[in-house]
Amino acid sequence: MISNTAEFIAGLTAYVNTLIPCYYESASLTGGYPYAVVNGLLVSSLNSGDLVPFYIDVYADETQQNATVSLEEACDLLRNNLNNRTIYSTGVFYATIGFDTQGTTGESEFDLTHRKLSLTARIFYTGGSN
């Protein structure tokens, strides 16, 4: 098994980008709302792959009308499309994602509203052996 976390991150962010704008660890300052940021990957090695808990932080502009409604709709969209989703990169990995929890998070920026989705991926690498 050859691990390739970078390829998993690329595949995950590419898929989330089909739903709403998505970044890894930091967001563009010029993008629109709502948007998502993938972070907090904690990789645990298993016999046949990796178990990877991670977060998707979802942000909306609190100054916009119905900001919390659009934020909850974005969270629902992500949750509905990521739970039990399999993503893959041919010849590198395939991963099944499961939804764990969703919660509110205090935000230091006065004009942002924020939710945190907790998910876990079970990754199987197909790119050879060590």
Image (cartoon, grey):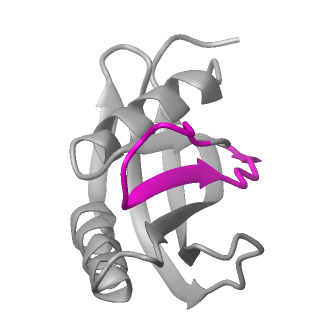
Q: How many marks?
A: 0
Whether residue 17 can be seen here: yes
Residue drawn where x is 56% and y is 50% of the image: 38
Locate residue 125 relative to residue 109 in the image: left or right. Answer: left
Residue drawn where x is 37% and y is 61% of the image: 34
Which picture quadrant has residue 74? bottom left
Image coordinates of residue 50 in percent, x first then y, are 63, 45
Image coordinates of residue 89 in percent, x first then y, are 34, 22
Q: Quadrant of the C terminus?
A: top right
Residue 39 magenta-drawn? Answer: yes
The correct choice, above or below, for 28 with respect to 2 in the image is: below
Q: Which residues are magenta?
A: 27-47
Which picture quadrant has residue 111? bottom right
Locate residue 84 relative to residue 31 in the image: left or right. Answer: left
Image coordinates of residue 110 in percent, x first then y, are 67, 76
Residue drawn where x is 49% and y is 66% of the image: 59
Which picture quadrant has residue 12? top left
Residue 128 magenta-drawn? Answer: no
Q: Quadrant of the N terminus?
A: top right
The correct choice, above or below, for 88 with respect to 25 in the image is: above
Q: Main secondary structure of the magenta part?
A: loop
Locate residue 91 relative to residue 108 in the image: left or right. Answer: left
Locate residue 128 relative to residue 77 in the image: left or right. Answer: right
The correct choice, above or below, for 107 with respect to 122 in the image is: below
Image coordinates of residue 71 in percent, x first then y, are 36, 77
Whether residue 94 can be seen here: no
Instruction: From the viewer's side, name the closer residue of 79 and 126.
Output: 79
Residue drawn where x is 63% and y is 29% of the image: 5
Instruction: From the viewer's side, name the closer residue of 57 and 86.
Output: 57
Instruction: From the viewer's side, name the closer residue of 105 and 119.
Output: 105
